[in-house]
Amino acid sequence: MTANDDTAGGFTAEEKAAMKDRAAEARKVKARKGKQSPAEDTADVLAKIAELGDADRALAERVHEIVAKAAPSLAPKLWYGMPAYAKDGKVVCFFQGADKFKSRYSTLGFNDAANLDDGAMWPTAFALTDAASIDEQAIAALVARAVG
């Protein structure tokens, strides 16, 4: 069984690590009693991005730049150990590095707080493979639509 094999019905090591990250984030917020400034949240996100491997770091940096420019009202925060962007405390979109779950590609995902509804079916996650090839306009449009 590989580290990413979930055939036994349990959580993978990567999923367990993400849950531990989320629990640590919740404890940190509780310990601060909600008094962390947006600048501190941004610093936490940038520090996490700096810890990522080269390919994921380059992608996360680009996504962070694009989201900050396209939707400055979104608040950066950590979510399951990855950069995320929230509106009124609810995560709208997030970056998930490929290395975290030993995936073939990184992901830009959107939660149900995102206003992306389009009929009865619409995408909520997008594969990212190369920072130099990111379609900044497409991501900016998605993020702006998600917030709007």
Image (cartoon, rainbow, N blue to C red):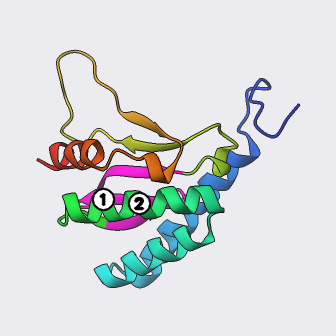
Residue 59, visible in the rendered structure: yes
Boundaries of the magenta span:
76-96
Percent x, y for residue 128? Answer: 48, 42
Q: Residues within 10 Å of mark 2 (few under 14, many from 20)?
A: some
Instruction: Give amino acid for label 1.
Output: Ile
Q: Residues within 10 Å of mark 1 (few under 14, many from 20)?
A: some
Residue 35, visible in the rendered structure: no
- Check disc 1 and report the residue beneath it: 66
Above or below, 131 against 32 in this view is: above
Q: Quadrant of residue 20?
A: bottom right
Q: CA distance from mark 2 to mark 1?
A: 6 Å
Q: Please report contact status of discs 2 and 1: CB closer than 8 Å, yes or no.
A: yes
Q: Describe the element under mark 2 as helix, strand or loop.
A: helix
Q: Describe the element under mark 1 as helix, strand or loop.
A: helix
Is residue 94 located in the magenta-colored stretch of the structure? yes
**Magenta region's main secondary structure?**
strand
Is residue 141 located in the magenta-colored stretch of the structure? no
State the residue at coordinates (68%, 55%).
17
- Check disc 2 and report the residue beneath it: 62
Between residues 72 and 41, which one lies in front from this camera angle? 72
Between residues 106 and 9, which one lies in front from this camera angle? 106
Instruction: Give amino acid for label 2.
Output: Arg
How many numbered circles does the render carry?
2
Left or right of residue 82: residue 10: right
Percent x, y for residue 96? Answer: 52, 49
